[in-house]
Image (tube, rainbow, N blue to C red):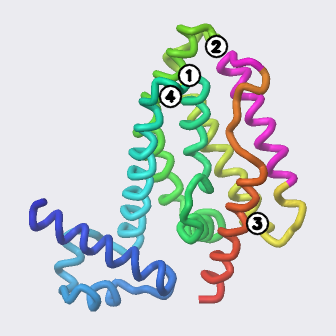
Amino acid sequence: MKKGDLRREQILDTAERLFFERGYDRTSIQDVLDALGISKGGFYHYFDAKESVLREICARRWFSQFDRIRTELSDARRSPMDKLNLLLRQANLFETEDSHFAALVMKLCYRDGDVSIREARRRVLLDSLAERVDEAVGEGIADGSLHTRHPKAIGRLLLLLACDVNDETCAMLAADPDNPDRMIRVIELLNAYRESVELLAGAPYGAVELFDPGSLLASWEAAMEEWKKLEEA
């Protein structure tokens, strides 16, 4: 790794650690500089603001998340529908083991209204997964499990729909986090989304399994515990 690339990674690693230890709002650029022992010039050579650092941290995490599923996608035992389910689940913010990160993104994007981070996630997801979704759809058409007259367009369309549904569910949850009925409304929306994917892809009813209600609820509750810590920070 080049010296400049190493310094950039050091800034990202240090900022990520401090964001998680102290909270994003309570961590300043100067805190990052002090932890690394570098000047402001050394920071601004790579980033123009704290928000740029966070966007890069998020993008790095998302690229890493998507890289990890490549092995699963290459498993010959997976059917095209299995692959499609796996790929579309990646749009779900809670499809992560890191509840603190999910809570941080929820707070910044859906409570504080940081559109740039939300759009960065959408771009990373589309750039990383659109081709893979097209491949899964193509395999499904070949083996007769999927039926669509638009194989070259359906993959990106499904991902765009997945992103929009994720944004809508996260916004619903962030706007009313203490309402016990919140997950009922979310699951109703997700079920409608699931059936929409089946119709668009020409999949049999029940073939799409984009979420497990129990796992979704557990992930949300864990993220909410982390959210409370962020709000108290």
**Secondary structure under badge 3?**
helix
Q: Which residue is mark 3?
A: 175
Which residue is farthest left? 3
Instruction: Report the side of 203 relative to 10 (left or right).
Output: right
CA–CA distance between discs 3 and 1? 36 Å
Q: Are marks 3 and 1 in contact (CB under 8 Å)?
A: no
Q: Which residue is mark 2?
A: 145
Q: Position of residue 70 (x, y in %)?
A: 41, 38
Label whose residue precedes the other's in the sequence (2 or 3): 2
- What amino acid type should be assigned to the residue bearing mark 2? Ser
Q: Which residue is mark 1?
A: 80
Label whose residue precedes the other's in the sequence (4 or 3): 4
Instruction: Report the side of 157 relative to 72 (left or right).
Output: right
- What amino acid type should be assigned to the residue bearing mark 3? Ala
Compared with 83, 58 (above or below) is below
Label whose residue precedes the other's in the sequence (1 or 4): 1
Structural crowding at the residue carrying mark 1, measured as other residues with C-alpha within 10 Å and reported as few (<14), some (14–19) or many (≥20) = many
Compared with 6, 122 (above or below) is above
Main secondary-structure element of the magenta-colored stretch: helix
Q: Are marks 2 and 4 in contact (CB under 8 Å)?
A: no
Label whose residue precedes the other's in the sequence (3 or 1): 1
Numbered circle sitting on residue 133: 4
Q: Are marks 2 and 1 in contact (CB under 8 Å)?
A: yes
Q: Which residues fall within the magenta stretch?
A: 184-204
- Please tell me whether residue 186 belongs to the stretch shown in magenta: yes
Which residue is farthest right? 181
Q: Position of residue 92 (x, y in %)?
A: 61, 49
Label whose residue precedes the other's in the sequence (2 or 4): 4
Q: Point out the frontmost of discs 2 and 3.
A: 2
